[in-house]
Image (tube, grey):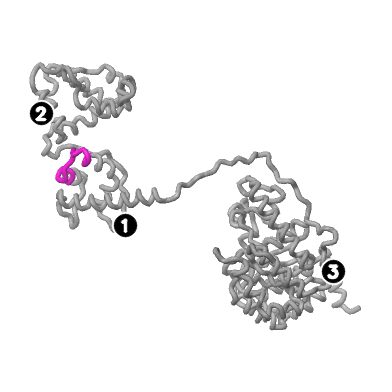
């Protein structure tokens, strides 16, 4: 056994049994950050450490949701990490540092590079990310969020045609949460689901899932309540617990989410 | 303090006393409320009443000049008042009981004179962008001015004088005229009405009382576990089945039959 094999074995057994890297692809404004937030909260709720990587310096959604300190300036573990600038070399250096920590600490990472597919493509090509993850026992998943815009879908197809940005665990997430008011779900997604390219990528192994709209999402965000805080009865920042209506909506939404991922056969892909 | 009561009927300002004391149509004004109202109404505003263009006031003042038709009442209640100025005035008029109003009235300025100190209760004047001092002043005192205009107590010329006494000038420092003040007043009234309309049109902010018991807690759920027989992770992947599943969900969410 050479030195590199020893390193792989030692670091892959350093942390939890399951280490995942979720690298979100696709265009911005498709609800990807919300989807990633759900998966982070779910992983933590189930007792796993998941660290957010926020490469989306424009919206900084994950950085805002997972700040490094609380109101009393006490540090919060596994807070979101972000690159110092949006310059390509800085992002690459930041990704390298975080992937190193992921492997050595054995802590899953969820990467949000909204609109940063070019960065990801270059970095994946440099690092050969699939092989890197396979060698170090990291489960790589690439979700691509789709909104009602057909341009989102076309962009996703372009991405999937590029072999660099494709992995065994590629998921197309049809996000109902971003469809416009007055638009029906069928009106938004029928053109996508009926597209020949959609069927083609499904035959190639890409998995489709449907993410339902959570009507009370903005209310939860305003109050600083997590999805699993609601169903476990944790209070918000002001010490007030979620009302029964919020509880019921969130609980139903989470149940449906779990069921759909199970039916798609990919629940274990989640971090 | 002077409170003159005409024999057989009250001094016209007596109704203002009741209004000030909050006793109109409900109960008699007496006690502390009267003392406060009398102080505010007579001591502070008596000069204004004598300078008022209101015909009722002027008739009353003229009648006071006729001998032996009135007697002067020096309310004892005010002697207990801690207001030094009011008490001093009460003492002064006590000493001149026999000819109370003759000297007092003569010492006051006439309507046309501009010796009055203040015609309007002072309010904080806020600046409005692109508007002059007269506009800002009228807007701050809108309620007072509107009330006096409505009762015809105030003419535009009088208002212009009052504003001049406040140190306000027109554009380029020219003396204010009634006509100029009237024009500004129309703009102020229009803007105040628009502001009121916007405030009325805005939906009222309602804060619903919480009816959730502070002890209420949702039942704690265990981490989701896949029900037996439904875990399809090991099932062979069938793209057609997955496509059908997605179509079924979309149809269901759109209210259509799958």
Q: Position of residue B138 (x, y in %)?
A: 25, 47
Residue B96 position (above or below residue B152): above
Viewer-proximal residue among A214 and B75 = A214
Q: Are marks 3 and 2 on the same chain?
A: yes
State which tag comes first along the sequence, 1 or 3: 1
Chain designation of label 1: B
Total labels drawn:
3
Mark 1–mark 2 Cα distance, whole angstroms, equals 45 Å
Chain designation of label 2: B
Which stretch appears magenta? B148-160
- Image point (23%, 27%), residue name: B42
> Where does label 1 land, which residue?
B129
- Image point (68%, 41%), residue name: B216
Residue A90 visible in the displayed image:
no
Residue B190 position (above or below residue B74): below
Q: Position of residue A253 (x, y in %)?
A: 69, 57
Image mark for residue B234:
3
**Residue A59 painted magenta:** no
> Where does label 2 land, which residue?
B106
- Image point (71%, 74%), residue name: A96
Q: Quadrant of the N terminus of chain A?
A: bottom right
Q: Nearer the viewer, mark 1 or mark 3?
A: 3
Looking at the rendering, which quadrant does residue B123 occupy?
top left
Q: Quadrant of the C terminus of chain A?
A: bottom right
Chain designation of label 3: B
């Amino acid at each position: 056994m050479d030195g590199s094999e020893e390193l792989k074995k030692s670091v892959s057994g350093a942390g939890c049994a399951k280490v995942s890297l979720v690298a979100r692809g696709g265009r911005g404004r498709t609800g990807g950050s919300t989807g990633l937030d759900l998966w982070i909260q779910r992983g933590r709720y189930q007792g796993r450490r998941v660290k957010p990587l926020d490469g989306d310096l424009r919206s900084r959604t994950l950085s805002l949701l997972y700040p490094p300190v609380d109101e009393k300036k006490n540090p919060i573990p596994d807070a979101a990490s972000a690159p110092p600038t949006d310059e390509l070399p800085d992002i690459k250096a930041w990704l390298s540092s975080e992937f190193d920590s992921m492997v050595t600490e054995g802590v899953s990472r969820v990467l949000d590079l909204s609109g940063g597919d070019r960065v990801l493509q270059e970095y994946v090509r440099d690092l050969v990310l699939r092989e890197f993850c396979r060698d170090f026992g990291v489960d790589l998943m690439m979700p691509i969020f789709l909104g009602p815009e057909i341009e989102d879908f076309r962009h996703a197809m372009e991405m999937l045609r590029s072999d660099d940005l494709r992995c065994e665990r590629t998921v197309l997430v049809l996000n109902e949460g971003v469809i416009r008011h007055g638009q029906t779900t069928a009106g938004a997604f029928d053109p996508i689901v009926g597209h020949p390219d959609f069927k083609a990528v499904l035959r190639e192994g890409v998995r489709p899932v449907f993410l339902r709209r959570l009507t009370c999402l903005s209310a939860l965000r305003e109050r600083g309540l997590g999805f699993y805080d609601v169903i476990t009865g944790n209070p918000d920042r002001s010490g007030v617990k979620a009302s029964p209506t919020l509880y019921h909506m969130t609980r139903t939404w989470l149940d449906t989410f779990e069921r759909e991922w199970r039916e798609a056969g990919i629940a274990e892909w989640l971090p | 303090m002077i409170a003159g009561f005409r024999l057989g009927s009250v001094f016209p300002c007596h109704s203002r006393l009741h209004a000030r004391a909050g006793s109109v149509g409900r109960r008699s004004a007496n006690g502390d409320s009267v003392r406060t109202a009398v102080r505010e109404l007579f001591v502070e505003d008596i000069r204004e009443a004598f300078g008022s263009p209101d015909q009722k006031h002027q008739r009353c003042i003229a009648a006071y000049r006729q001998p032996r038709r009135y007697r002067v009442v020096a309310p004892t209640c005010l002697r207990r008042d801690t207001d030094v100025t009011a008490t001093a005035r009460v003492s002064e008029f006590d000493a001149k009981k026999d000819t109370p109003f003759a000297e007092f009235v003569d010492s006051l300025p006439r309507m046309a004179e501009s010796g009055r100190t203040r015609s309007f209760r002072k309010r904080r004047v806020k600046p409005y962008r692109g508007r002059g001092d007269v506009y800002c002043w009228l807007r701050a005192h809108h309620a007072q001015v509107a009330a006096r205009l409505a009762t015809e107590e105030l003419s535009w010329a009088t208002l212009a004088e009052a504003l001049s006494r406040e140190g306000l000038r027109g554009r380029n420092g020219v003396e204010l005229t009634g006509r100029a003040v009237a024009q500004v007043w129309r703009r102020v009234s229009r803007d105040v009405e628009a502001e009121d309309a916007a405030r009325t049109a805005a939906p009222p902010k309602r804060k619903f009382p919480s009816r959730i018991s502070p002890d209420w807690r949702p039942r704690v759920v265990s981490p989701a576990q896949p029900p037996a027989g439904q875990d399809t992770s090991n099932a062979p992947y069938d793209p057609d089945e997955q496509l059908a599943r997605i179509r079924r969900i979309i149809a269901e969410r759109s209210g259509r039959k799958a």
